[in-house]
């Protein structure tokens, strides 16, 4: 079967076991691997690196598109292979090592990593490892279920290792649109003006002489870990649908809305799933990840086209998608993540963006990454790429966590990823706060009244009232602003009544 996938005959003698290919990666190197949110990640070479690290010193800088599946980050972290990791991860084992200071983690906007590589602002990629469905007659690499940063890694690296995954259908060829920005100075505008437009190649162009090894694999992507909608996420979806319908009735949006973007995860996936029962038709998506909700919307006839950088699905939906690629391929396209997330295109296409917050404060600042302000969760991902440049920037969260011990609406966020200037709408299961055109004091009242859980609403109102007496454009009680987080650390809950400060 693999001979049918490697259509440049001169590359057949580059086939070798994973351990032999991994030997090309030496201690101290920078490695760029394919993989974006569990999709299209390398399967064999990372495991070979972990085995080798048991017998010799081997520490690398690992760049990817986003998170990896198949426990790859866990395996590499446990083997102490990772000295430095960027730009995103979701693995609990790696997360512990990051927060212990054992792995240096660089949390980046997902559109920026290869831009910094291109500008030589960070160490160049020595070896790229890319999963592929095929290699073309010219040596071009046909990606699998993600593009991510694979194109730039493969085009910039000194050596390229290709993992041909025979579990991936050959029909994936044609799903991708590989286009990279032209060099500076004199960079031209990206010629994309519609979600369903193709502007590039269906493969990654690579000089065959730089393909140093080919490894044959047969392993599926890890399934999505997103949970199905629950009562709270259905309520969040309902509030957002009502808001969008109001925008249509007011003449600010057409019935087909603007192209949609949604972040990865349970809440964002559930919110999009709520559009299946909405009155909107001919929807389009321009996002970074296509989840189960995307396939449901396509099958329901609500969504006419979806563009992203990866496809990350649950097991049953994954099987359905791959088995019916001929039907989906005319309505789905995968691009490099610096194109799917490019600020120029987000602004030009006028996206409605829906991303998830760990916590929001009363003025609309959002923390997406750090638990308690100090401990990394996953990373900022692409949310900043989209929020800053959106037509309407929406952040969603459940109002409480840990059975009510934690309020997701707080006086001041413990870490800021998205400032109030980039946040238009906040939604929880209790309601929606439309913050457009409001000053900070007005924003606070909307967020407290509509989004906070009743358990914390009076505490928040007391805080903002007393802070307002002190004055300021954005009133705060500095000595109390992070007291809720301190109380959580010391007492295990934010809900105790704070000591009242003098007015």
Image (cartoon, rainbow, N blue to C red):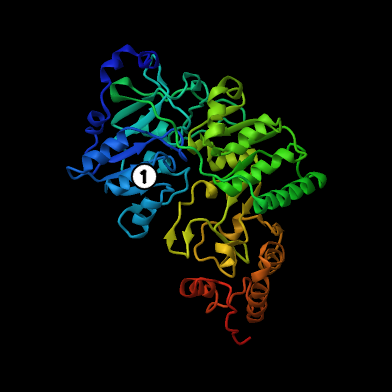
Is residue 193 visible to us here?
A: no
Label tally? 1
Q: Quadrant of residue 473?
A: bottom right
Q: Is residue 308 left or right of residue 82?
A: right
Q: Nearer the viewer, residue 421 or 255?
A: 255
Q: Residue furthest bottom?
A: 502
Query: As rendered, which of 273 and 303 lies closer to the eye?
Result: 273
Which picture quadrant has residue 419? bottom right
- Residue at 62% across, 47% down: 354
Q: Whole-percent x and y of residue 31?
A: 31, 39
Residue 68 at x, y percent in the picture: 41, 41
Residue 154 coordinates in the image, percent (x, y): 36, 30
Q: Which residue is mark 1?
A: 73
User: In the rendered view of the protein, which quadrant contains the N terminus?
Assistant: top left
Q: What is the quadrant of the C terminus in the image?
A: bottom right
Nearer-the-camera pick, 268 or 10: 268
Coordinates of residue 200 in the picture (x, y in percent): 51, 25
Farthest-out residue, right? 249
Q: Residues within 10 Å of mark 1 (few under 14, many from 20)?
A: many
């Amino acid at each position: 079967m693999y001979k049918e996938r490697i259509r440049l005959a001169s590359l057949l003698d580059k086939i070798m076991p994973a351990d032999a290919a991994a030997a090309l990666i030496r201690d101290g190197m920078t490695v760029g691997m394919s993989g974006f949110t569990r999709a299209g990640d390398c399967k064999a070479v990372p495991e070979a690196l972990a085995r080798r690290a048991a017998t010799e010193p081997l520490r690398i800088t690992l760049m990817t598109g986003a998170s990896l599946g198949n426990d790859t980050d866990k395996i590499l972290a446990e083997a102490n292979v990772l000295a430095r990791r960027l730009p995103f991860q979701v693995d609990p084992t790696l997360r512990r090592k990051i927060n212990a200071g054992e792995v240096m983690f660089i949390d980046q906007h997902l559109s920026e990593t290869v831009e910094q590589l291109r500008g030589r602002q960070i160490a160049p990629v020595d070896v790229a490892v890319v999963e592929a469905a095929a290699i073309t007659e010219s040596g071009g690499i046909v990606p699998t279920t993600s593009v991510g940063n694979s194109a730039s890694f493969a085009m910039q690296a000194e050596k390229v290792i290709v993992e041909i995954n025979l579990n991936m259908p050959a029909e994936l060829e044609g799903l991708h649109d590989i286009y990279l920005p032209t060099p500076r100075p004199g960079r031209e505008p990206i010629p994309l003006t519609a979600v369903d437009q193709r502007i590039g190649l269906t493969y990654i162009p690579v000089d065959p002489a730089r393909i140093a090894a080919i490894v044959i694999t047969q392993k599926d992507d890890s399934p999505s870990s997103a949970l199905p909608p629950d009562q709270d996420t259905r309520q969040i979806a309902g509030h957002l649908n009502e808001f969008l319908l109001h925008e249509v009735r007011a003449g600010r949006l057409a019935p087909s809305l603007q192209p949609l973007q949604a972040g990865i995860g349970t809440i964002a996936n559930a919110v999009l799933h709520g559009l299946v029962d909405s009155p909107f038709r001919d929807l389009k998506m321009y996002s970074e990840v296509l989840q189960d909700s995307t396939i449901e919307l396509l099958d329901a006839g609500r969504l006419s086209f979806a563009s992203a950088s990866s496809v990350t699905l649950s097991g049953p939906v994954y099987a359905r998608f791959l088995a019916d690629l001929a039907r989906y391929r005319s309505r789905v396209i995968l691009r490099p993540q610096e194109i799917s997330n490019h600020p120029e295109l987000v602004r030009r296409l006028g996206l409605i963006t829906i991303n998830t917050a760990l916590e929001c404060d009363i003025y609309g600042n959002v923390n997406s990454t750090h638990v308690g302000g100090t401990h990394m969760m996953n990373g900022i991902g692409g949310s900043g790429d989209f929020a800053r440049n959106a037509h309407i920037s929406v952040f969603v969260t459940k109002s409480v966590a840990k059975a009510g011990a934690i309020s997701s609406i707080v006086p001041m966020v413990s870490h800021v990823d998205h400032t109030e200037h980039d946040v238009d709408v906040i939604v929880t299961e209790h309601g929606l706060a439309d913050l457009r055109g409001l000053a900070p004091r007005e924003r606070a009242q909307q967020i407290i009244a509509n989004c906070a859980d009743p358990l914390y609403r009076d505490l928040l109102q007391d805080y903002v009232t007393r802070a307002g007496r002190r004055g300021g454009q954005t009133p705060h009680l500095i000595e109390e602003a992070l007291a809720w987080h301190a109380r959580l650390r010391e007492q295990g809950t934010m809900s105790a009544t704070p000591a009242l400060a003098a007015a």
